[in-house]
Image (cartoon, rainbow, N blue to C red):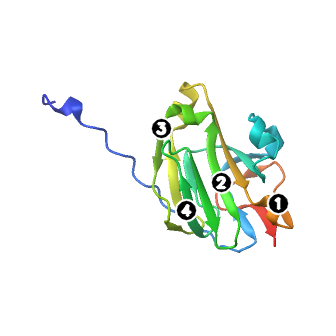
Amino acid sequence: MGLFDMFKKPAAPAKPEDIKVESVPANIYAPVSGEAMNMEDVPDPVFASGAMGKGIVIKPEQGIIYSPVDGEVTVTTGTLHALGIMGDNGVEILIHVGIDTVEMKGDGFTGFVGRGDTVKAGQALMTFDMDKIAKAGKEDHVIMVVTNTDDLPNVSPVSPQHINAGEVAVVVTQ
């Protein structure tokens, strides 16, 4: 190890492979594999109350977030723990990784998309380090909310169950 090697930043994690999703406009797909929960069971009062909209919470099995729809990234955060997507189907989606993970200031999160990027369902959007989140004393629940729920006739999340990334998580009737 040379004198200046200790100042080098570690290499950024490689972007994971995308997953194959046959996109249907009325469907919103799971952004991560894990145990799906009812929104009211998430340990965050703002999301649990439904104030942000209807959606689903997933206790993740791995730290990769995939796009739940075809659309455009409308919001990213400097802390990389959340992003917004406007689906080609008119559905506005917020994906939020963890509870109070904003306090981690991006440590343990890597984003692969930015505002204005076009995304496809199943495309890898970000990774997060589940161990770092746990060591920071935070929950790693992945929350996916349809933020324009009030503008849509029906937003129906799946019942609590195991769900794989790319499987239908929410059905929207327009």
Mark 4, other Cα within 10 Å: few <14 / some 14–19 / many ≥20: many
What type is the residue that disc 3 sits on? Gly
Mark 3, other Cα within 10 Å: few <14 / some 14–19 / many ≥20: some
Residue of label 2:
94
**Where in the figure is residue 63, as x and y percent of width and height?**
55, 45
As drawn, 23 above or below 7: below
Residue of label 4:
73
Rounded to the nearest whole Å, what is the CA distance between mark 3 and mark 4? 21 Å
Residue at position x 49%, y 35% from top? 105
Disc 3 versus disc 1: nearer the observer: 1
Rounded to the nearest whole Å, what is the CA distance between mark 2 and mark 4? 10 Å
Residue of label 1:
150
Disc 1 versus disc 4: nearer the observer: 1
N-terminal label among 1 and 2: 2
N-terminal label among 2 and 3: 2
**Where in the figure is residue 76, as x and y percent of width and height?**
53, 52
Q: Secondary structure at mark 4?
A: strand
N-terminal label among 2 and 4: 4
